[in-house]
Amino acid sequence: MKNKEDLLQTPLLNDHHHQEENDYYSHSKSIQNKNNNKINIIILGLCFCILFSAFSPTQILQTTINQNLGYYTLAVLYSSLSISNFISPFIVSKFGEKISLIIGTLSYAIYIGSNIYVTQPSLYISSILVGFGGAILWNAQGSLIIKYSTEETIGANTGLFFALFQTDQIIGNIGSATLINKAGLSNSILFTIFMGISLMPIIGFLFLKCPITPKIKKTIKSINIQDEETKGNQENHDDDDLSIKNIFKSIIILFKDKPIQLLIPSLLYSGISQTFFFGVFPSLIGVEWVGYVMSVFGFFDALSSFILGKLSFKIGRKILILISTISSIIGTVLIILVNQSKIIYFSINNNNNYGEYKILCYFIGSALLGFSDAGFNTQLYSLLGVLYPTNGEAAVGVFKFVQSTATAVAFIYGPYASLFENVFVLDCLVIISCVFFIFADNFSKSV
């Protein structure tokens, strides 16, 4: 006969029938949570697509319309973005992702609006402002993607987001090309339309739900951001109560973590490549074709993001990052060869049609670069999400700090470096990035 203590320790639901009911309920709940998270990611991706359908052509046209001033204001923008990444995790943690997304969106609308009537002071001021707002926007986005995902779904979710987001290159560039070439709109009217479009995502952000994250099966290492005497109290604090000092400290500590150190070349490449994609490369094409060529870049970026995100968990990040590296090298080498006329001239009926084939090569190069960009974006987010699921704000803060610092530096030297020098730096860095990424990915097996 059992005593009173034994009876108290006996589970109330211990028969097989009740266990099956609990398992079924748990499985159904898990499927529902997964579907809800996916819906939120779709909303997030579509909102970013709309916002950047207005911002991306604005950014691309900077170096074409404003020339050197465009390069300098973009350098200021990414410098501001870089510095602001030390503050943005605190703001996201304090106000929540939804409010942070709205704040960031408003800053983009102000920046686009400053191009309606261009003055040097207004462009510089709005560049600083959008750098601050952009850091908040992207930190909130990265935090949400990580919170909406598990280790098994982080690759697919990242791919889904970037597939939706990168269609902005198609919509924005074809739209701007049509408005400029066909409709013949002035710059002031063009940017007024873009500013109105950039405000639309605010409505979508209001429909985002709080992240529903199932329990992570594996034990995840976390980053200590408190001193020894305050460790015990840390567990009792909610994320919203973290001070700016602690958030800043968590970012600094992350820089000392081995996987982050190994990923720094990849983050630098990610930043410098943005300067090449949206600054150097578009300036080679010309106003008439730039929208169409960059829309091909966006199409392959979006499509590849979806496919590579799905393949990330199945075939591994190492293989995908290697393929992306090769794609980047082939694309940049093709662009430099055709630009310097060292490619074989094609002729039809003894007539040289080099100009047409030059544009064709730009289309092929942009497709290869779009694929490469998708590979690095999806695999970097995927790896960071696996390594630091409980430190999303800090991890994204580090990512965006290094990336935007590299972008700012590249926009400063961009006007003075030759095409060969830009490509040489980019290709050397992508090879180093690939090697170090492979070593960093090994740490994902130990978490």
Image (spheres, rainbow, N blue to C red):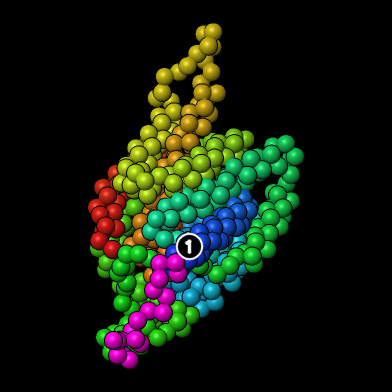
Q: Does the magenta run of residues contain 189?
A: no
Position of 350 relative to 71 (above/below): above
Q: Is residue 336 visible?
A: no
Give the number of marks: 1
Q: Which residue is drawn at the image coordinates 72% and 36% (left, top)?
A: 182
The amino acid on which the numbered mark 1 sits, given as a three-letter code, is Tyr
384 relative position to 45: left or right: left
User: Where residue 317 appears, x then y in whole percent?
Assistant: 34, 48
Position of 357 relative to 23 (above/below): above
Local crowd at mark 1 within 10 Å, few (<14), some, or many (≥20)? few
Residue most toward the front? 1
Q: Quadrant of residue 445?
A: bottom left
Q: Quadrant of the N terminus?
A: bottom left
Q: Which residue is drawn at the image coordinates 74% and 40% (left, top)?
A: 184
Q: Is residue 130 visible?
A: yes
391 relative position to 436: left or right: right
Q: Which residue is drawn at the image coordinates 52% and 44% (left, top)?
A: 302
Position of 71 relative to 27 (above/below): above
Residue most toward the bottom? 4
Range covered by the magenta-colored residues: 1-18
User: Where residue 58 appears, x then y in whole percent?
Assistant: 60, 51
Position of 77 relative to 61 (above/below): below
Q: Quadrant of the C terminus?
A: bottom left
Residue most toward the top? 349
- Dot 1: what SS? helix
Q: Which residue is mark 1?
A: 24
